[in-house]
Amino acid sequence: MVKLGMGMMRLPLLDENDFTSIDYEQVNQMVDKYMDAGFDYFDTAYVYHEGVGEDAFKKCVVERYPRESFKIATKLPLFVITEESQLEPLFAEQLKNCGVEYFDYYMLHNVSGFTETAWKNVDLYSFIQKKKEEGYIRHIGLSTHGDAEFLEEILFEHPELEFVLLQINYLDWEDEGIESRKCLEVAKKYNKQVMIMEPYKGGFLADVPEEAEKLMKEYNPDKSVVSWAMRFVANLDACVVLTGASNLKQLEDNIHEFENADPLNEEELELLEKVSEIINSNITVDCTKCRYCVDTCSEEIDIAKLFDLYNKHKLLEKDDWTQFGNAYLNYSKLPGVGIASDCIECENCIEECPQQINIPEVLKDVAKTFETEIYGFEN
């Protein structure tokens, strides 16, 4: 039976420009609402919220609920690993961060071409297997944004893995780069449990273009846009669907949609194919706001934030001033932040991007749009 998991990558903030300023009071309310609904699976990571994500889990869950009442999944940050000597202290730090004596689910974070320095040069698989044997991990697995062929190679070589966390949603189902359907089929071929991430694709599927929403509402006026995305993933052969929420209302909506996620019929599946075509034709930058790129930027550019503003501006199909242009201007005046034209094209961000976006090239157009065409200033 599929569970609804609470992803802790996009928690509510007290200051929208400071991702460490977690609104703990609201997160506590969200955790209580989630647990009261009968769910118990939390997902976090070492790098979430610029390094305080695991501690947020400890404060809001571990310090408020008995250990047997919840399950915790976290991830070994391959982004920072270059040698084996880092593994033991990093793992011990994660246990301390989360405030637990063992992890229910522990995975290698984003095994792909972007993190090959770690998994090619360090025997990560033996390390997590050893930690499982020592009782510090109940189940071992990996998360990946790699394609189906890449996933099959890993699962063939590492039968000890028990589960995989995959990016699956109706927009990526047949995408040639992400291959959601094919990856799910590979995981099932090797009898691995599947956890689903990005069911709303970073919010794209919660705020679809007007033309797409019209199709959905004409077919069934009683179903929300979000419900289509949830119904798609909740009825797949998986054990957990992770949904992130940035406020209590979003979490309540996620719970409601999950509890009412009846299967899609053939007509609805065909309609989602049309919806996907509309969305893809309207998305300028395929960014899910995971923020991995932000952590690597030497110029302190909040790439995910700027791409979000850029996408929303483009969706309005206007060439003049917009509220998003104003938001960009306000952002540019914050102390210590980089703007789009500050990009030095080092390409470190490209290596970290699960969606394979050529970030420096897109930033050039972001700078042209907001800094030159709208406001006429250049850095």
Image (cartoon, rainbow, N blue to C red):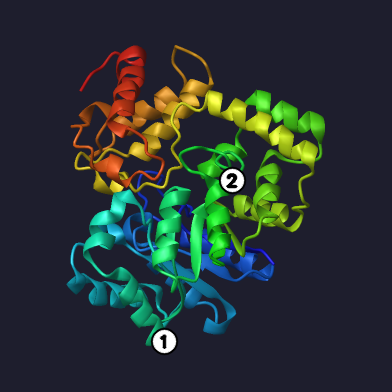
> Which sits in the foreground, 216 or 253?
216
Position in image of residue 78 (x %, y %): 30, 60
Please tell me which residue lies in front, 98 or 248. Answer: 98
Which residue is located at x 73 percent, y 33 percent? 271
Residue count near mark 2 (Cα–Cα under 10 Å), binned few <14, some 14–19, many ≥20? many
**Percent x, y of residue 131:** 36, 81
**Amino acid type at image mark 2:** Asn
For the question of whether residue 106 can be seen, the reply is: yes
| Image position of 325 (left or right of 241) | left
Vertical order, 363 against 74 (above or below)? above
Q: Name the residue under label 1.
A: 135
In the rendered image, which quarter contains the C terminus?
Answer: top left
Tell me which label, 2 or 1, sits earlier in the chain.
Answer: 1
Please state the horizontal and vertical placement of residue 218, each as a whole percent of the image. Answer: 80, 29
* Mark 1 surroundings: few (<14), some (14-19) or many (≥20) residues within 10 A: few
Name the spot of residue 309 as percent of width and height, x first: 43, 30
Q: Is residue 44 left or right of residue 82?
A: right
- What residue do we see at 55% from left, 37% from top? 204
Give the labeled residue for mark 2: 169
